[in-house]
């Protein structure tokens, strides 16, 4: 295995991790502030991807497609929050799981109804369709590099939003003390809707960005959702920093595991057995990572008890 | 007779009457549907022990369902090829004997439940939900990427597993077998929920500090409950494999976990017969709505949403009124 | 000198800059009621948590019947003979009163409860439970759902569950709270008789009850024990009077 391939895979892992962060950030915010476990977060990811694909095919503009993904997911988030989610804040986790599972069924089948079962495709914008030459003779797709950049910018922006702004202060206050923030005269219902819409927009945005790499289809959100769960469990539920660290850990572990494990087993096995054992183990690697972290820190890396 | 007991009796008799009538009218498809209800109900009965009595919101029970299914599938495929599963350190051969398959499904599910439960029960609340979900996914991806038993395509079972004295090819015989196991499962869960263990487990769900203060460790109770629960759902998985003569990674998918939970909730959580009512309702909806629209999951989702938001007792709760719970004296 | 059944030796616990327990020592001897009083925010809850085992002290030790249980958790301390009641009723609210009491009796057996035999038909457990309910005056409510009990009745049930444990030491966290004058008077009489069975560490706000009942009183202020002594000594103690001057108007 050469260095070039290794660095390429590292970048792939980073890109994957950054996408996971966009999903995980919303999940962890929504849990941290409202105490809600939202299984339908993957549906918002899907909504964003479909909105982007539809707008891109109608207008040909990738920028408009991204704006559409943010808007559509945020609007879907607001509607869902006002109709269903806000009735769940005072309920137990079981009710939250069931109701948001029901939302997945409705979203998925609804999307299938509107768009059909065939996948849509979203093209990478022409400006970013080529490859970029990096040091060591590495050539890496510009679009994936852009995703990594966007991810870091969003992460930094979120960090600033939470720590430096009034709304961030309110979000943090809402996390620690609902009554106090209500006493401060902040309209808690509006705050909750806004946080939910923010999380939804991030998910939708991630869906659109990934939609240009993979296909856009019904059910695309749930595998990502579960990885995002693994991410925030590792990072500690409610912690943005934990979501970031967890996302990169999961992204890198998964990508590198798929590349390295078959090679590793190949060192002392015949190639076909090494490939099958290696890839089977690689598919389990992030769950093993999660289990290992939980053994030592049951509330995740940055979680509080 | 209590109203719930009456409902349970009616449910049981109905579950027997439908396939008997179908048998008389020579409608094997209906018998198969009834068998499906019975098997899915058994999977729900397993989950209900953890969820209803123990308050353990496991979104990973597909793990056990799939393990049971693959236990059946793998043993049968080796029986067909006369190729032993392993020869070292001891010889394990494939088998078509249902009791052996069931035993293996139960034992392996229980062991996996012990390992995953020991870890996930160290956490609680949303952590527990997400971790069980993740463990289920782990098995899902493992079966997809493990080529020996069909990988993503699944594994067909070409031989019919046997049970001494019965013709398992006859749908009615197979139904009877599954029905008997469901009744046994219900009996076991009923006994457990009335036992001291059940009392303490149910109390730990309501108030953990109380149970600890009387000197009982909730973790141990929950782990035992999780293991028994996984074993029952695993048995259901083995039966499901025989019903479909096919197993695939879908049995491990998180949608399967969600559906098993839906059976429990639609019927009424912590009601002994809740999963039976829920599975029956689910299959009826699938048949009726599935015939009306390809997109019947929308209606299922809407129904589930209504049950969760407005009718928390589920079907049996609606019929029997409030005040169900652990089924104690 | 009689041996202390419960012996708290110099425990300290800080949360950041706040010293919630500051080198607290107190003990409980056979046959006595030792009351712990102190104004709100004095650190009583933190101290109880460390005695019951739900919180670890930063330093110091907790001894129960001559055994160091500092590193034992709540479950182990319950099994070592500590019977506690909670300040806020901590019961299985969906279960019946009798089931709650049976749970206590079940815990007193010190083993993982069986999965097969119907527990409510176990005549030994039932007898223990009903006896405890009778003692606190809840026998006729045995088949009520706990959630349907009045606030005061739940307090009584707390005590009954502790009785079923047959503990060697009682730790009671404000058992009089919300009982009303009549209920308090009955409970005072009850505790007076109970202490011969096992000594009681009584944390209580009701000063009348404390001074009627306690053999010894310790006063906790800002995490420190400022005085320990007989009710008369405490009544006469200047430091205690000062600590309570502001407090008395509020209560």
Image (tube, coloured by chain):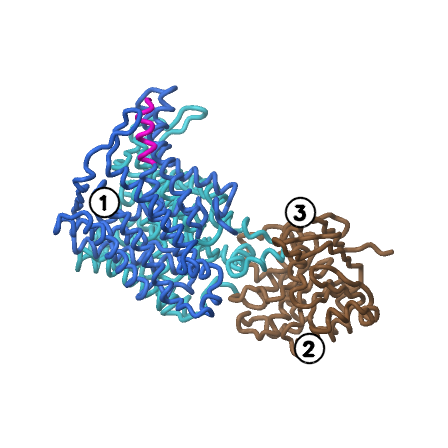
Chain colours: A blue, B cyan, C brown
Q: Chain of mark 1?
A: A
- Residue at far right of view: C1
What's drawn in magenta, residue-wise?
Answer: A1-13
Q: Residue at x 70, y 73 (%)?
A: C246
Q: CA distance from mark 1 to mark 3?
A: 54 Å
Secondary structure beneath label 2 = helix
- Residue at far bottom of view: C182
Secondary structure beneath label 3 = loop
Q: CA distance from mark 1 to mark 2?
A: 68 Å
Q: Chain of mark 2?
A: C
> Counting other residues with Cα less than 10 Å from the Cα at mark 1, is it few (<14), some (14-19), or many (20 or more)?
many
Seen in the picture, residue A140 relative to A217 is either above or below; the reply is above
Pointer 2 or 3: first along the chain: 3
Seen in the picture, residue A155 relative to B101 is either above or below; the reply is below
Q: Which residue is mark 3?
A: C71
Q: Chain of mark 3?
A: C
Q: Does any portion of residue B186 appear in the rendered image?
A: no
């Amino acid at each position: 295995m050469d260095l070039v391939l290794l660095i390429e895979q590292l970048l792939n892992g980073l890109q994957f991790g950054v996408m996971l962060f966009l999903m995980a950030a919303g999940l962890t915010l929504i849990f941290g502030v409202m105490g809600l476990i939202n299984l339908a977060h993957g549906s918002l990811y899907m909504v964003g991807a479909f909105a982007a694909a539809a707008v891109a095919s109608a207008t040909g503009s990738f920028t408009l497609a991204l704006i559409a993904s943010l808007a559509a997911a945020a609007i879907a988030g607001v509607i869902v929050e006002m109709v269903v989610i806000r009735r769940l804040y005072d309920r137990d986790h079981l009710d939250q799981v069931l109701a948001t599972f029901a939302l997945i069924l409705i979203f998925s089948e609804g999307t299938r109804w509107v768009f059909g079962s065939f996948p849509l495709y979203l093209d990478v914008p022409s400006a970013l369709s080529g490859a970029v030459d990096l040091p060591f003779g590495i050539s890496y797709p510009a679009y994936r590099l852009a995703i990594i950049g966007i991810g870091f910018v969003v992460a930094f922006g979120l960090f600033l939003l939470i720590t430096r702004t009034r709304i961030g202060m309110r979000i943090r206050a809402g996390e620690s003390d609902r009554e106090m923030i209500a006493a401060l005269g902040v309209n808690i219902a509006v705050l909750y809707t806004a946080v939910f819409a923010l999380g939804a927009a991030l998910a939708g945005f991630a869906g659109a960005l990934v939609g240009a790499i993979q296909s856009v289809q019904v059910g695309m959100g749930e595998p990502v959702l579960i990885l995002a769960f693994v991410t925030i469990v590792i990072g500690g539920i409610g912690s943005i920093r934990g979501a970031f660290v967890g996302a990169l850990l999961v992204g890198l572990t998964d990508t590198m595991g798929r590349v390295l494990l078959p090679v590793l087993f190949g060192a002392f096995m015949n190639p076909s057995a090494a490939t099958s054992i290696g890839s089977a183990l690689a598919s389990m690697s992030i769950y093993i990572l999660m289990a290992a972290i939980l053994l030592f820190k049951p509330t995740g890396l940055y979680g509080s008890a | 007779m209590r109203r719930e007991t009456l409902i349970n009796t009616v449910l049981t008799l109905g579950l027997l009457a439908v396939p008997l009538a179908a048998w008389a009218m020579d409608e094997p498809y209906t018998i198969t549907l009834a068998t499906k209800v019975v098997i899915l109900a058994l999977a729900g009965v397993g989950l209900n022990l953890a969820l209803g009595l123990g308050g353990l919101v496991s979104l990973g029970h597909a793990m056990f369902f799939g393990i049971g299914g693959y236990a059946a599938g793998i043993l049968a495929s080796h029986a067909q090829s006369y190729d032993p599963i392993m020869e070292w350190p001891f010889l394990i051969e494939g088998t078509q004997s249902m009791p052996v398959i069931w035993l293996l499904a139960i034992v392996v599910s229980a062991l996996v439940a012990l390992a995953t439960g020991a870890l996930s029960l160290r956490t609680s609340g949303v952590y527990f939900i997400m971790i069980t979900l993740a463990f289920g996914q782990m098995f899902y991806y493992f079966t997809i990427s493990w080529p020996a038993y069909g990988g993503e395509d699944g594994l067909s079972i070409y031989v019919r597993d046997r049970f001494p004295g019965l013709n398992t090819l006859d749908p009615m015989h197979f139904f009877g077998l599954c029905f008997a196991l469901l009744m046994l499962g219900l009996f076991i869960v009923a006994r457990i929920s009335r036992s001291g263990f059940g009392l303490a487990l149910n109390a730990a769900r309501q108030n953990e500090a109380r149970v600890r203060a009387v000197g009982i460790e909730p973790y141990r109770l929950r782990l035992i409950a999780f293991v028994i629960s996984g074993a029952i759902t695993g048995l259901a998985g083995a039966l499901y494999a025989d019903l479909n003569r096919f197993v695939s990674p879908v049995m491990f998918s998180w949608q399967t976990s969600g559906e098993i939970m839906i059976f429990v909730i639609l019927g009424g959580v912590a009601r002994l017969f809740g999963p039976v009512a829920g599975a029956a309702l689910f299959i009826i909806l699938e048949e009726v709505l599935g015939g009306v629209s390809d997109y019947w999951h929308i209606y299922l989702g809407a129904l589930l949403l209504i049950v969760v938001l407005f009718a928390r007792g589920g079907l049996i709760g609606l019929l029997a009124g409030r005040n169900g719970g652990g089924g104690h004296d | 000198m009689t041996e202390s059944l419960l012996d708290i030796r110099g425990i300290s616990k800080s949360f950041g800059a706040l010293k919630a327990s500051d080198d607290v020592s107190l003990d409980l001897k056979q046959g006595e009621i030792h009351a712990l009083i102190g104004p709100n925010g004095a650190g009583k809850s933190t101290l109880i948590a460390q005695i019951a085992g739900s919180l670890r002290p930063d330093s110091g030790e907790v001894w129960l019947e001559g055994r160091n249980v500092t590193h034992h958790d709540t479950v182990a301390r319950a099994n070592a003979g500590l019977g506690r009641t909670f300040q806020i009723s901590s019961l299985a609210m969906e279960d019946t009163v009798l089931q709650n009491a049976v749970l206590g009796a079940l815990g007193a057996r010190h083993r993982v409860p069986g999965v097969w035999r119907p527990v409510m038909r176990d005549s030994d457990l039932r007898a223990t439970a009903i006896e405890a309910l009778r003692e606190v005056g809840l026998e006729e409510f045995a088949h009520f759902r706990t959630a349907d009990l009045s606030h005061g009745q739940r307090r009584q049930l707390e005590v009954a569950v502790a009785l079923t444990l047959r503990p060697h030491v009682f730790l009671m966290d404000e058992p009089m709270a919300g009982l009303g004058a009549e209920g308090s008077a009955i409970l005072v009489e009850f505790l007076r008789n109970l202490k011969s069975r096992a000594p009681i560490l009584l944390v209580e706000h009701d000063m009348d009850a404390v001074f009627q009942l306690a053999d010894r009183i310790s006063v906790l202020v800002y995490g420190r024990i400022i005085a320990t002594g007989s009710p008369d000594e405490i009544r006469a103690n200047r430091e205690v009077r000062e600590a309570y001057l502001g407090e008395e108007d509020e209560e």
